[in-house]
Amino acid sequence: MSNRFIHAADLHLDSPFVGIGTLREGLDDVMRDASLDAWDALVDCCLAEDVAFLVLAGDLFDRADGTPRGRSRVRRGIERLHAAGIRVFAIHGNHDPLSGRSPLQGLEGVTVFRKDVPTSETFEGPTGPVTVHGVSFGKREVTDNLALAFERGDAPGLHVGVLHCSLGEREGHGHYAPCSVGDLVAARMDYWALGHIHAYSEENAEPPIVYAGTLQGRSPKSGERGPHGAVVVEFEGDRVLSHRRVELDRVRFEAIDVAIDELDDEAALERELRRRAASVVAAADGRLVLLRVTLTGRGPLHEVLVRDDYLAGLRTALDDQEDAELVWERIASTAGPAVDLDDLRQSNAFAAEVLAVFDELAADPAAAEQLLEGLTASFTDSALVGLATEDPVTRLAVARDLALGLLLEQGGAA
């Protein structure tokens, strides 16, 4: 057995992906099984690294009791780990609070930390004693600072803290079990294994305070994109020597911006899209990639992009020709017409008056949001629909450029 352990979090096993459009035929099973296949990859990694133990920092499931498929797959994985002498230490988070009996309770080799009050367990590791401290959520919304209740104690050897928590405000994540880096440092742990934030993040160097991130990205949102996996931690005695990420996701969400400034026509656009997509697929190392594209910049191609259903048709055309490694998940555009906005503002053209109205709206977020809601509802085939989840500033700029593009086509800039 090596002097290593693995830290994983936010597995959300057997939960559905969110925010994804229609997938082409044959991909439903891949998506349905992605989180469970990532769990199997985690177990394989534990065995390959010959780790002493595995830490699961909350949200193993998407609800308190998980699903039958999820529970079954977890049991099989833990049986493999137990047979290899690998212990498992787990806490429950806000998605799977320990409101009753844990689905992991009673499995050999597994310690589930109780709710609300941190407890600890000490065992003999490969280089001396190891103490793991942890606490589970007893309900979904925990607002107490649980970090303040952690105490290292006098036991020798390595001390690992396991906590599902919010360090500061994080967009897209509930503010649960809020605490600070200072609170965690004060507990004198040698490593903090955190869960709740889905993007990998190193919050402190000494001691290491690390969010492992979700094992498998769950949506096209920014925090779910790119590589996901777990953290392999090497230690000796009471010291952490190093930690490194391992990529274990089965499906990968990616997003790229493609500028239209130098693209003359549709053929050039398609060539550039395929070229950029090929690089993303190559970096994913055989994983299925769900790719979201945003077209940016300014140029005459804007006149094509704003035609009814053009972007949706382009996405379908590209996706129909792809193999099993790439899905064109969405193509949207924030690109504008070939016009210099500053020059237009200084002109006497009618389009300059329209631009002035949009400039006023940009200074009045409430009025801008009201306008955008009306435009999106009225023009159901417009580029605004594909940007419904983007921030109002971006959507307002797209609405502005749509209006200016129409005026320019009709000679309204003169």
Image (cartoon, grey):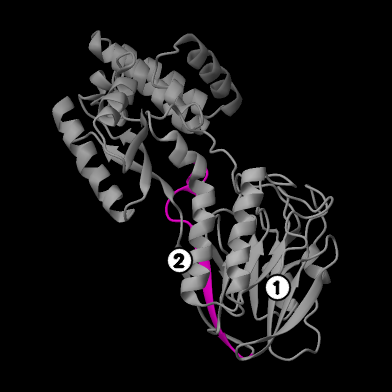
Q: Position of residue 200 (x, y in %)?
A: 52, 60
How much space separates mark 2 and mark 1, taking CA atoms? 20 Å
Q: Nearer the viewer, mark 2 or mark 1?
A: 2
| Magenta-colored span | 218-237
Q: Depth check: 132 or 110 in front?
A: 110
| Residue in the picture at 80% in, 78% down | 151
Residue type pointed to by label 2: Val
In the rendered view of the protein, which quadrant contains the C terminus? top left
Q: Is residue 261 above or below residue 266?
A: below
| Residue in the picture at 63% in, 51% down | 72
Q: Depth check: 348 or 230 in front?
A: 230
228 is within the stretch colored magenta: yes
According to the picture, the residue beneath numbered tag 1 turns out to be: 161
Q: Position of residue 90 (x, y in %)?
A: 70, 64
Residue type pointed to by label 1: Gly
Q: Quadrant of residue 23?
A: top left
Q: Earlier in the sequence, mark 2 or mark 1?
A: 1
Q: Depth check: 333 or 159 in front?
A: 159
Q: Position of residue 109 (x, y in %)?
A: 70, 71
According to the picture, the residue beneath numbered tag 2 turns out to be: 246
Q: Residues within 10 Å of mark 2 (few under 14, many from 20)?
A: some
Q: As drawn, is 153 to the left or to the right of 354?
A: right
Number of on-image labels: 2
